[in-house]
Image (cartoon, rainbow, N blue to C red):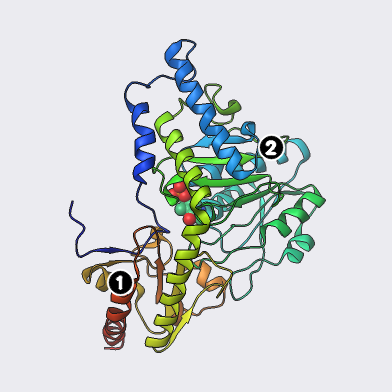
Amino acid sequence: MDNRGHVYLDYAATTPLDARVLQAMLPYFSENFGNPSSIHYWGQMAEAALEQARQTVATVMNARSDEILFTSCGTESDNLALRGAAFFEKQVRGANHILISPVEHHAVSQTATQLAEAFGFQLEYLSVDEFGQVDPEEVRSSIRKETAIVSVVYANNEIGTINPIAEIGAICQEKDIPFHTDAVQAAAHLPMDVRRDHVDLLAIGAHKFYGPKGIGALYVRQGMELLPAQTGGKQEKNLRAGTHNIPYIVGMAEALRLTSIELHERSVRLTELRDYLISGVLLRIPRVRLTGHPTNRLPNHASFVFEGVDGNALLMLLDQAGFACSSGSACRVGMPKPSEVLTAIGYSSIWALGSLRVTLGSGTTREQIDEFLEMLPEKIEQVRKISTD
Ligand SMILES: *Cc1c(COP(=O)(O)O)cnc(C)c1O
């Protein structure tokens, strides 16, 4: 495949596999192919790789290795956290209340909706400010004795805003209510520390930080109990049955280790490019707003709304011009409904339908941003014309 003439600016949707990660994975597809549940030599080799990977992930998160569960993706981790905690808390103490933010990824919000609609849980939404941030004091006043789980996204995938997770975590801990955070987007850019943040459950997915797709992890604080998501064998402390995907687990651990080492350097470089992009867009385009927090946002993340623009038409024009961007969540392509996140932070349809997310990463250069800024005004004008014709 020849990518010349195409510029990738959609690192929040997924990232390319780091070449060093691929190298670390390769032996586990060939000579080291064993099942870690087997007793023999091959099993022991695989088991050693599995536990080494678990230790690596735990170290990066400041957790203990027996607090890390491997899953198939960020989505599965979110599902296991919410459903597992909700069912367990209901079983042992009759808790039937779920508290989430209105800016959760669908992996959380749809799971919570199903728990409400099919299993009788009472689902309550916190409010957010104009930047999409949750107020910890509102968490305090909304928690009830019968709250089974609180879930607040660490950093939003659509608008990049970072939430005050440590403060929310401290309040949940004080009230002794399980707290989950979806850190799938955050883990690529922010130092994770489950002790500092007082979280009970934290979800990550490898393909957002230059690891392979199809592998994720869930931190489960020691003492926190869940109802298993997948029953069968005894893998992952009986919580997630199924033969381990060793090459991918090894790949995720290596990608996360590299991320933790290079985090600062990557963040400094991307923040500068991001701010250059944001000020360029705000300067060149009329009737535009930056969505999400202006500074307390992911270092690689720029997101906008343009008044009177069809966001999907814009994405297609940008793609034709060689720029791969997104309108927020990759899952929403082709749906002419304003995003729930943009609605929650107060944008009307005329603005919210014209959303654009530009997310930067390892391959992004200043020249690419310059080309992007050069091309964008004309495309916006073009789409605005179509919309009013
Ligand atoms: C990508 C993403 C997910 C889903 O993760 P997968 O590994 O793709 O299943 C969940 N939450 C957030 C915030 C994300 O950005």
Task: Choose the circle earlier in sequence order: 1 or 2.
Answer: 2
**Residue in the picture at 27% in, 79% down:** 375
Q: Is residue 338 visible?
A: no
Q: Inspect the image, locate mark 1, and give the three-letter code of the amino acid beneath it.
A: Glu
The x, y position of residue 288, in whole percent, is 43, 84
Question: Residue 27 versus residue 383: which sits nearer the camera?
Answer: 27
Task: Return the x and y of residue 160 as percentages of the image width and height.
Answer: 51, 66
Residue 382: image location, x then y, percent: 26, 84
**Residue at label 2?**
88
**Secondary element type, mark 1:** helix
The disc placed on residue 367 is 1
Residue at coordinates 46% horizontally, 27% vertically from top-left? 244
Give the percent coordinates (x, y) of residue 109. 55, 55
Which one is nearer the viewer's eye here, 64 or 163?
64
Depth check, front residue: 6 or 307: 6
Q: Nearer the viewer, mark 1 or mark 2?
A: 1
Quarter-wise, where is residue 140 in the image?
Answer: bottom right
Residue 295: quadrant of the picture: bottom right
Q: Residues within 10 Å of mark 2 (few under 14, many from 20)?
A: some
Residue 40 is labelled as: none
Is 161 positioned to the left or the right of 90 in the image?
left
Q: Is residue 197 left or right of residue 82?
A: right
Q: Where 335 sits versus 166, above or below?
A: below
Residue at coordinates 53% horizontally, 52% vertically from top-left? 187
